[in-house]
Amino acid sequence: MRQSRLFTKARREAPSDEVAKNAQLLVRAGYIHKEMAGVYSFLPLGLRTLNKIIGIIREEMNAIGGEEVLLTTLQDPEAWKKSGRWDDSVVDVWFKTHLKNGSELGLGNTHEEALTALMTEHISSYKDLPRYVYQFQNKFRNETRAKSGIMRAREFIMKDLYSFSTNLESHNEFYEKVAAAYENIFKRVGIGEKTYRTFASGGSFSKYSHEYQTICGAGEDTIYIDDSKRLALNKEVYDDAEVYATTGIDKANLKEAKAIEVGNIFTLSTRFSEALGLSYKDAEGKATPVFMGSYGIGPGRLMGTIVELMADENGLVWPESVAPFSVHLMSLGKSGDEAFQMADALYADFVKAGVEVLYDDRDISAGQKFTESDLLGIPRRIIVGRDAVATGQFEVVTRATGEVAKKTRTELLS
Amino acid sequence: MRQSRLFTKARREAPSDEVAKNAQLLVRAGYIHKEMAGVYSFLPLGLRTLNKIIGIIREEMNAIGGEEVLLTTLQDPEAWKKSGRWDDSVVDVWFKTHLKNGSELGLGNTHEEALTALMTEHISSYKDLPRYVYQFQNKFRNETRAKSGIMRAREFIMKDLYSFSTNLESHNEFYEKVAAAYENIFKRVGIGEKTYRTFASGGSFSKYSHEYQTICGAGEDTIYIDDSKRLALNKEVYDDAEVYATTGIDKANLKEAKAIEVGNIFTLSTRFSEALGLSYKDAEGKATPVFMGSYGIGPGRLMGTIVELMADENGLVWPESVAPFSVHLMSLGKSGDEAFQMADALYADFVKAGVEVLYDDRDISAGQKFTESDLLGIPRRIIVGRDAVATGQFEVVTRATGEVAKKTRTELLS
């Protein structure tokens, strides 16, 4: 798209009310807008990146047999009373509201209850299992503090997947498929190497759950890494002797690190199916509660994590897979002159070739264009100035490394 | 996809708690799930159709220069107090909630306030105009009654577009572009012929606004149609002498009809820009309030309208453009026999050719398959039974008309 038509403007200064690097840079670059603490709107560039992340997650969820749905924000207390999670003393992040007749409603902070209740209409026999259902949907969490930008928001999009299996064995098989899919996702968005499968406590129905933790100084969590095994432990289980026996990890080899939880996978067992009456008849006709798991990734948090890890002193740096555009084309000089005409033609070529290109066609100084281009963080910058007009060679700068190459039009388009 | 893997099951009986035809059929067919009155989840088939509608609207919005964003549900009262719309006595559909510190928040029922406030950071000069910003985002409206299924929900996705122009003339030009885009949308989803541009009252800042009304017995509105001019008037302006002068409509030619409001376009003038301080400097440096418009379409309501208009006594009937799948393939007989093998092969061919196909590969009776297929309403049904095995010709049934044709594999794939 032509940057002259993009409504967002980059800012010179970081917003004074943000402490998190991700929010500072994303607000400055016009990717997001802060509505209030912990509540962010996504502007055109930010939404493009968010949708790329969502697209990658969706592909991986579909590949393991996930079926996509869209559940609701408004929650009927009924199901939550059955599971014992309606009370504010049990779940302390509720936002609640009222219908006009005075009935209380909740804003969904997660969807185990709603989906388990829904599935009672579609699962009755072992032949109906397994089922894997996921969504990208807003969650609302009334966090006391919200200082980590889009990494811990009060309103945020979550990918939540729920599995419905006949028994533990079948559950475990899928659980490992999700683990593999999650590893693909973190690799594809560029944080694979820094992300560790991390043992966490499992709650009352399972010994352990797993978090995916990405090593980062801005993280709110502390984890203990065994690099040789590519595994980690979180604080909850660090002093649990059994976890060392289970994993073969030697406590002496662990190194401590700050990390961001970018995903979690969780065995729910029959916690919700028993509370909400979700059972199936086995081959002998015996009613048995469905065995469940839940699996979360926050695309917004992932986006924030990528910023925290990759941005440099000049601004954002996006991996190709999630960048809002793949090329940042810019014309230097003045509107109407030869360089602009040449850039216009190259822009048309890129559009025709299906390349996602942001074209800075504005009549502003080269310096301002470079500064803003660094801030926006698009992977490759192509410069069309006097040089290109004279030589037919375009300067291509890689944002992440600063590497410069010269390419002809034909090379660029191939 | 293979129907054996689709988690939703069709129901024989209409749900007893739904009065609207759209909700009865969509729930029966497993497209949607009722969480509570006026609050519906979208299940895999329903979400596919909803996303096709959203895709069509997005294409048309992008084609007229719209830039997509995603604003938030949680609303800070500040902006709404400035516009005078925070009070429940002014806007009677608010859902409100609280932060932990006791501050009151609203759940967005529309986004003029939030977006106008946001745009003050990006518009300062006439050179920054015009701008067209839209989103697909949840709205929350605390309706007293919610009996029209997905046509009037308490939580629903809305496409809301807002325009920011220098003056009335520039605004009017875009307003007519939106009108044309809306007409394209209604045509593309199959309700163009029954949909009328309808004059409605404009509120305090503009004489008229326009609704798009689709003639349908299930509609909540009454309109008056002039068929020769392809225009209509709503009740608000029916007795307004000026509207007849403006439009050249002769009251005597009008015929009354029930209709569903499927869209609206609205001149806001400076109502919100003045309240929220959104102004631009003109070429002489004089600060002038930005001239705004707003333009809404509810994809869920559109989906409900299509159901109300096209469904027949056997179930849903989708136009190709919004159908969850384009082909409903079914094998008759028993799993493993020749017809199933032939259907399996044809399914693989379709998938390879990129055709969106739902394949009923379940081991159930032909009668049940036909009944469910009618209910689901996919445009074309292809039957693979003994006949196909014997002749190599497949029966293709058009859902809307019942028309039957015989085609070879090669014809089907071309």
Image: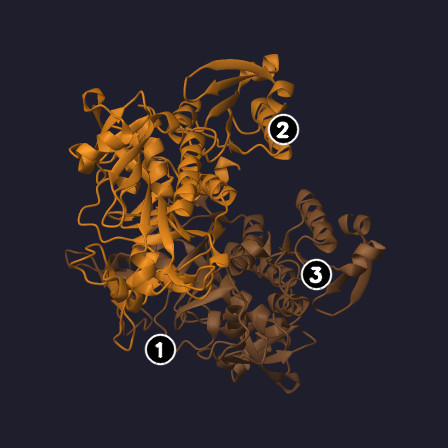
Chain colours: A orange, B brown
- Crowding around mark 1 (Cα neighbors within 10 Å: few <14, some 14 to 19, many 20+) is few
Q: Which mark is residue B174?
A: none
CA gap, disc 1 and disc 3: 50 Å
Q: Is residue A108 visible?
A: no
Specify the amino acid type for callout 2.
Ala
Task: State the SS at label 1.
Answer: loop
Residue, disc 2: A345
Label 1 amino acid?
Thr
**Which of marks 3 and 1 precedes in the sequence?**
1
Whole-Å distance between the Cαs marked 1 and 2? 57 Å
In the rendered image, which quarter is residue A89 located in? bottom left
**SS at mark 2 in the image:** helix
Residue A398's spot in the image, x, y percent?
A: 46, 20
- Residue pointed to by mark 3: B333
Which residue is nearer to you in this view: B78 or A217?
Answer: A217
Nearer mark to the viewer, of 1 and 3: 3
Q: Which residue is mark 1?
A: B144
Q: Which residue is farthest bottom?
A: B252
Of the pair B213 and B35, the residue shown nearer to us: B35
Q: Can you tell which quarter of the image residue B6 is in?
A: bottom right
Disc 2 sits on a residue from what chain?
Answer: A
Q: Is residue B39 left or right of residue B329?
A: left
Residue at 81% from the left image edge and 62% from the top image edge: B405
Could you say where residue B134 lies in the image, as x and y percent from the top left? 46, 53
**Which mark is in front, 2 or 3?**
3
Look at the numbered disc 3 and give the secondary structure of its residue: loop
Q: In the picture shown, does residue A115 fall above or below A136?
A: below
Marks 1/3 in contact by CB < 8 Å: the verdict is no
Q: Residue furthest front?
A: A284
Q: Residue drawn 22% across and 45% down?
A: A146
